Image (tube, rainbow, N blue to C red):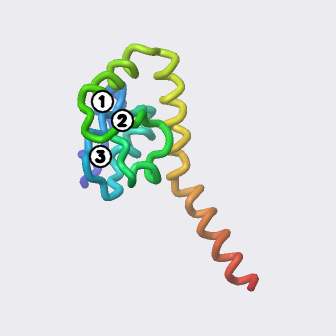
Amino acid sequence: MGIRKHFEKIIIFKSSRLVVYLVIYNSGGMVACEAMSCGLPGVSFDLEALKTYYPKGMIKVMCYDLDKFVDKVIQLMDDEALYCYMKADALAWANEWGWPKRCCKVLHKIELLYRR
């Protein structure tokens, strides 16, 4: 993706209120994490893979229950206290994906290997 397209995407995220992650199969895409790093909480189906990828910052709904999904989107839009909590949760989780923390974890594991 070109740098201009990347900035356009970030501008869209920053002008949004939440991420509606309406996937029924997930292989670990980064779109939701990118949105969460811009402070967007989300709503998604409760897919097995998302329990690992996005355990925080998203309200999960039983798979394929579109009525409940819409209810949760509306709830997140209307309930300011819930929104603020989920936004903080999303930012905290997205921060866990950042390179500085990931690099520290990898270096720590390498150090442990060399100590053996």
Q: Secondary structure at mark 2?
A: strand
Q: Residue 55: percent from the left, percent from the top?
A: 49, 45
Mark 2 and mark 1 residues within 8 Å of each other at the beta carbon? yes
Residue type at tag 3: His
Q: Earlier in the sequence, mark 2 or mark 1?
A: 2
**Residue ranking furthest to the right:** 115
The residue depicted at 32 percent of the width and 27 percent of the height is: 16
Residue at (53, 35) in percent of width and height: 89
The residue mark sitting in front, 3 or 1, is 1
Q: Nearer the viewer, residue 107 or 73?
A: 73
Q: Residues within 10 Å of mark 1 (few under 14, many from 20)?
A: many
Q: Earlier in the sequence, mark 3 or mark 1?
A: 3
| Disc sitting over residue 13 in the figure | none
Residue to which mark 3 is pinned: 6
Q: Which residue position is annotated with label 1? A: 69
Q: In 3D space, how far apart are the residues under numbered discs 3 and 1 (Cα atoms)?
A: 28 Å
